[in-house]
Image (cartoon, grey):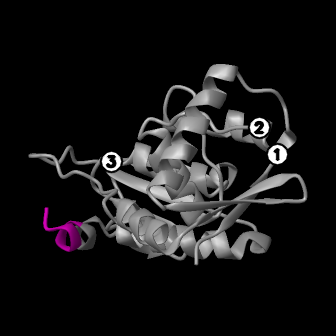
Amino acid sequence: MGSQIVMDSKVFVRQVAIGASKAILAALFVGAVMVAPGGVAGTMEVVQKFFAGERVDPREEEKVRRALRYLRSKKLIDVQRQYQKEVFSLTKLGYFKARRLMKSFGIPKPKKWDGKWRLVVFDIPHLKKDKSDWFRSQLKNLGFANIQKSIWAHPYECRDQVSFLTDIAFIKPYVRYVVAEEVTGGKDLRRRFEI
């Protein structure tokens, strides 16, 4: 039901701000592996090492081993050996837990709006159309308003949420986060967000 990830047993994911177990679940849910030295913003550095088969700190290796053992003990992932590689996939239970995790990932509403708009602008290559469609659906789930096909707006701070999504889908180079004080059609947007 979920995505599968094939990896050498000597390369590993680092612990993420939301916890290694949750990170692995979310990554498997979108078909990617996610890591983050020092939080979500730095996730791609170790991911590249992960896929390149480069060495990773043994302490990070142990964090990942523990997270994988935990997920397996809870029957959230299935681990199989194929051609000297370990293949990790979500079980049915893991798929639903990961889906719940992604749905709970929201943008908090402050007591008072700061008058600024957060714009997400992206141009994802056609070869990654599935990632582009997934990213649009996640922005919609987060409550963003669609201004144009690849331009979305939100009134509240959401840089971390956008960074998280771009990291786990490997689309960070194609996405820009803009903070603007004025947007054409601002009155319509204010009505839409009831501010």
**Secondary structure mainly formed by the magenta segment:** helix
Which residue was labeled with disc 3?
181
Question: Does the magenta-highlighted stretch encompass residue 191?
Answer: yes
Give the residue at x 58% y 78%.
Answer: 1
The image's mark for residue 43 is: none
Give the residue at x 33% y 59%.
Answer: 154
- Secondary structure under tag 2 reads loop
**Disc nearer the start of the sequence (3/2):** 2
Count neighbours of disc 3 (C-alpha within 10 A) and say few if under 14, some if 14 to 19, many if 20 or more: few
**Do callouts 2 and 1 mark residues in contact (Cβ within 8 Å)?**
yes
- Report which quarter residue 144 is drawn in: bottom left
| Residue 114 horizontal/vertical position (percent) | 20, 43
| Residue 181 horizontal/vertical position (percent) | 33, 47
Which residue was labeled with disc 1?
8
Of 33 and 95, which appears nearest the observer? 95
| Residue 152 horizontal/vertical position (percent) | 44, 66
**Do callouts 3 and 2 mark residues in contact (Cβ within 8 Å)?**
no
The answer to whether residue 121 is visible is yes
Which residue was labeled with disc 2?
11
Cα separation, mark 2 vs mark 1, equals 6 Å
